[in-house]
Image (cartoon, rainbow, N blue to C red):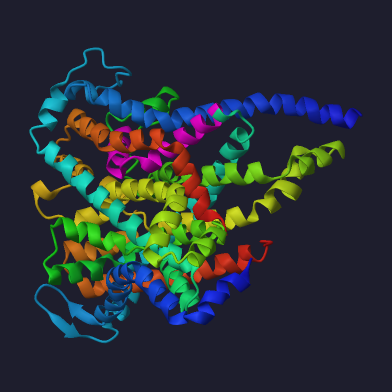
Amino acid sequence: MSTAALHAPRRRKPWREWLASYLFLLPALGFFLLFVVYPMGKGIYISFFDYSLSDFDYVGLDNYRNLLRDDVFFKSMRNTLLLVLVTVPAVIAFSLFVAMSIYKMRAFGRSFFRAVFYLPAVSSVVSITVVWASIYHPNYGLLNYVTGLFGAEPVAWLGDTRTALLSIIAVLVTTSVGQPIILYVASLGNIPASYIEAAQIDRATPWVIFRKIIWPMLMPTNLYIIVITTINTFQCFAIIQLLTSGGPMYSTSTVMYGVYEQAFKLGHFGVASAMGVMLAIVIGIISFIQFKYFGSDVEY
Amino acid sequence: MSDHTITRSRLSLTRPLLTALLVLAALFFIFPFYWILTGAFKIQNVAVAYPPEWFPLAPTVQNFIDLFKNPVPRWTFNSFAVAAGEMLGVCIVASMAGYALAKKSFPGRNLIFILFVSAMALPKQVILVPLFTMLADFGWINTYRGLILPAIGWPFGVFLMKQFAQTIPSELMEAAKMDGCGELRMFGTIMLPMLKPAIGALAIFTFVGGWNDYFSQLIMIRSTLMMTLPLGVATLQGEYTTPYGVLMAGAAIASLPMIAIFVLFQKAFTQGITMGAVK
């Protein structure tokens, strides 16, 4: 880097360069402060209020205290964590399997499969849920028809507390693997073929090659995929709202869905904000753990 | 030697098995789209027939006629307007900021960048409630600006542009500076052309993201005429009976533009995704 050249004009008139930089940053920073940072602060602020259409009273920590005593909130938090714990590994395993199968293909096959697995991610979530609602339908759904061919009893996939969350997760996984597959294909392509060939000459089994060479070299990609999939899963809202509305008996209600219900169905903006703050804290802790745990294996 | 041949023969057995699994998975991903497309041409009692009709034997366009009894053209226009507005705003704002963060030195640069990046770790939806109350105070609920402007504040674009601008060599800019090139001209004539691939990827991402941002649309839109296409389709779900054919027709129309964009610009998509991941 030619630092001398960069610094030369700066020494002459640093304030001009600064002013120009700030002017270039101003629009982005303005929008960011007004529509992201300010609402964040406001969210924390109103979480201390009994805030509805008619009231705006300071209640201290009451919203938080009530939430911690609320069974529905705990159920939603448990469902949220369960959703993350199942979805993230499932997404990793599935995308890695697909990426490993397609990264050596010719360009056409590679783009074809990449496109197929990305389709649910670019499609409107409304379209996805409309079709899955029909497939899961207890009376004339396709899924019960197919399982029925194998002699299984029909199941109310979305109406049974035992299957509802799993049915949601299945849809969520199909909408989440597109980006990870693209990332894995790119990283696998960057692994020098000579490493793998050398191991093959040493008669390493495919499993050993995967464990000892491929997996460690994918570590930075793994971390990135885990982080984006976790955030994506915490955000899962539309699939739940459109397929089950959190039911039956709150078995598919997540914190994000609870925020929506409290704020926009019941008009309890204070409670909803407190839920949002607690969700943000949980996400912060989980991100921290992920970076600590997976970040330590990453070689930069 | 025998060891090697065992591995080989085992491989030759697993390879077709894995390929079969891949093809099966691909079919599983394509099938919902097949079901939407065929469902759109089935009349109601065929759509709910049991056992299901795998292919519509008597296809009908009645579902599309019924669908267009709703203001579908207006919904489509709304979706395009919102997505295009977000796209334009994000691209302008992010390319300027990304350029400054990557190529200029000034006090507070790292702090500002860290601020942008750490906000990205939070799900956007956590701020939707306070954002809603704020926009209600502005009187922006159920308006285009209430949907478009907040999306421009989301820092992903800034991050992407900064990552890309960093890879552009500084020599050209330095030479231009020696020749007395002004700041705006430097950005417009030297930086922008070089940023083009990243701007393309960001534009497509933002457009698709804006089109599909169901949650924001759900809470910000209050009237049938202001609805976006996905939101409008979602409201077709009846309370007691579900008009499956009409819903499938709507689902097809709501996703078709995005699928077309994806197929046309797959390269830009792939580049944008890998670009955002490089450290």
Residue at the right extreme? Answer: B1
Q: In the rendered image, which quarter is residue A220 located in?
A: bottom right
Quadrant into which the N terminus of chain A falls: bottom right
Quadrant into which the C terminus of chain A falls: bottom right
Q: Is residue A54 left or right of residue A94?
A: left
Q: Nearer the viewer, residue A218 or B239?
A: A218
Q: Nearer the viewer, residue B22 or A41?
A: A41
Which residue is painted at 49% across and 58% down in the image? B165
Question: x, y (%) of residue B272?
Answer: 47, 48
Q: Nearer the viewer, residue B263 or B221?
A: B263
Q: Is residue B89 found inside the magenta-colored segment of the image? A: no
Q: Is residue A179 left or right of residue B36?
A: right
Q: Nearer the viewer, residue B125 or A269?
A: B125
Q: Is residue A121 found inside the magenta-colored segment of the image? A: yes
Question: x, y (%) of residue A138?
Answer: 29, 35
Q: Chief secondary structure of the magenta span?
A: helix
Q: Is residue B129 left or right of residue B72?
A: right
Highlighted magenta segment, given as a residue range: A108-137
Question: x, y (%) of residue B276?
Answer: 49, 54
Question: x, y (%) of residue B246?
Answer: 17, 30
Which residue is painted at 29% across and 33% down in the image? B256
